Image (tube, coloured by chain):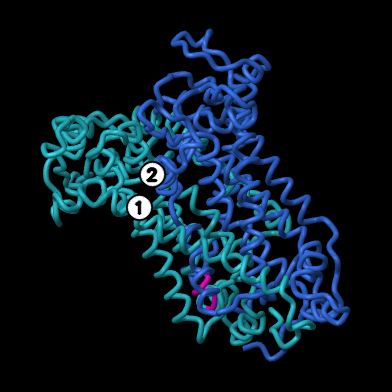
Chain colours: A cyan, B blue
Amino acid sequence: MSVNGSHNAKPKDRTDQRAEVALGALASAVLLLIGFMIVFVFSKAWPSFAHNGLAWFGPGGNVDEQLANIFNSPANPSNYVYTMHAWPLLYATALITGAAVLLSTAISMLSAMFIVEFAPEAMRRVMQPVIRLLAAVPSVVYGLIGILVLVPFVGNHVISGAEKDSVRYVIQLDGSSVLVGVLVLTVMITPIMVAITTDALRSVPRSWTEGAAALGVNRWRALRTVGLRAARPAIVAAVVLATARALGEAIMLSMVSGSVGFAPNPLDGTTFIFEPARTLAATIVDNAEGLSVKPFGQTVYAFAAVLLISSFFLSFAGWAARQSMRKYTLQAR
Amino acid sequence: MSTHAHVPAPAAPPAPAPPRLAHHRGEESWSRGDKIGVALAWAAGILLCVLAAAIVLYMLFRGIQYLSVSLLATHPLPSLDQTKSGGFLDPIEGTVILTILGTAIAAPIGVGIAVWLSEYARPSWLARAVESGVEIVAGTPSIVLAIFGLLVFQQSVFGFLSFTAEGNAVFGRSFFTAGAMMALIALPLIVGSTREALHSIPSHVREASYALGKDRISTIRRVLLPASRRGIGTGVTLGMGRIVGDTAIVVILLGASQQIQPENGTPVWGLLKGTGSTLTTYVYNNSPAGEGGAPQKAYAAAFVLLVIVIFLNFAVDLIARRKEPTWTR
């Protein structure tokens, strides 16, 4: 849409050139900021990675004990403790994020199709403010409802005494669990995906779905096979955005999923979803007070560095997916 | 299957409700799987409505139960006895200050970036890089932005923005530093909706302005920006909603004090240099997750927070409904 220089009435206009340079510099500052972010966070985090090597990402020992040891390091810099095996945190992050995104993808595809095709007029009018409301509720409010309503409910009524006994020697189950974390997180990220998917389904040319309908398939099939498929780039964009949001959710998860660096064990059967877990982002919030202790701060920044890289990677993956699909499907807006 | 094709859509369909696929009752085959699919779609839609209603009603119920004027009007006090620990006047003020500060920083920068991206965008590789840069900022978790901000603002260069301890250790936590990072989470929203607004202005409007002898920058200032006021307003309001609701940045960058603690000296500057709290951290600290176990106060503050957010949402609607110049294409 931008008009090129050939239209410019006064080629020698200095103010205009200065304005272009100034605005361009302002825009480039964003890139500079990202560069700074990488350099600052990684240089601060480096000692933690350097002391542990690849074992940093591996399992071994109790994360909370390791954090306490790092926090209580001797004051002499040469005696700093850095030992950290962050696997339980990484695993908890992947588990909670992945489960919430999967659940939310299913719900939001279905509800987007509902809004576009099946909802009665009155309900469709209600749906839009509903989605916007769910998207706007601050995470701390979700966390508050989670910790004061859902956690006690799960702890008192859903988890049976036998289940509590079965893992008594490993971990205490009080309701703060993977389950509550995933459920609340799903509610938080679903509105983003519904909004984007609904827009995309609406922008699928009518003739495409009509063509399918003319071939005799029903509305559900037409929408699912033609509509959803044509909207794929937008759906990928939606999933990426939702994953980024889920990955970075710190406050709500630190409130409801239990502040224990524990790796829930799938071998425990169904009890597994009632076990607590703490994601990377929640770990940063929970340990923010110790940032001034040098080795401890460096370890926390290492968590942040992992998050930063993951979110970069997500942005890039979303971009690449959209590029590759742009050729033969609708463009994501 | 059906030889009589279904009724074609009217040439100009009524704008609010885009036409749907026509029903062919009895003519299509609905397998059991399809029926289950439709049933699930209904279930998902109803689930979202029920959730939203449950959240609002529950918070309303708790809000009416626990909110009182005295809570809104008294300063928080450090006391374990909940009858003496005061209300949340300071967190409300903190939320207002931080929102205004964050938006004041983000709005001009965001509009500037959007203008450059949509009107200049040369060289194009730089424009593409900036575009994805904004996307990356939008995707960065606010907790990471927060501790990055702490790292930056603890450098002695930025000592003038926060408290400084003896020995020149910079505290790095103040309304200024939190506001700067808040600006980053509002920025992508402002850039996005301003760009969209500029995009929707047809190019002949620009050409008409050039034909009158205006150069590019005065066209932007006098024609394009006034015409995209609505988009800018939407972006700013959305950004405000984001800032009001963010907790992570406040927890890390605004200090742990419940009261607003300005630095002594100049009134406004000292306040912005000082520490404080917002409604979000007040809720967090008074919930069982924080140190103070005062769920009643947390509910009351969360209710106020929710009211502010819903009000901002409503404001977005009002702005979107305002009359815009309609261009003939």
**For residue A40, which numbered disc appears in the image?**
1
Q: Are marks 1 and 2 in contact (CB under 8 Å)?
A: yes
Q: What residue occupies the far bottom of the structure in this picture? A: B3
Task: Say which residue appears at 50% left-offset and 57% top-offset.
Answer: B138
Q: In the image, residue B250 lies at what x, y percent?
A: 49, 36
Q: In the image, residue A221 lies at what x, y percent?
A: 53, 75
Identified by mark 2, the residue type is Leu
Label 2 secondary element: helix
**Residue B145 is inside the magenta segment:** no
Q: Which residue is mark 2?
A: B151
Can you say which quadrant of the picture contains the C terminus of chain B?
bottom right
Q: Nearer the viewer, residue B2 or B201?
A: B201
Q: Is residue A325 left or right of residue A119?
A: left
Task: Say which residue appears at 38% left-offset and 44% top-offset.
Answer: B151
Q: In the image, residue A61 lies at what x, y percent?
A: 12, 41
Q: Nearer the viewer, residue A245 or A79?
A: A79
Q: Is residue B213 left or right of residue B180?
A: right
The residue range painted magenta reads A230-234
Task: Say which residue appears at 34% left-offset and 51% top-offset.
Answer: A41
Q: Say above or below: A22 vs A107.
A: below
Label 1 secondary element: helix
In terms of image quadrants, where is residue A196? bottom right
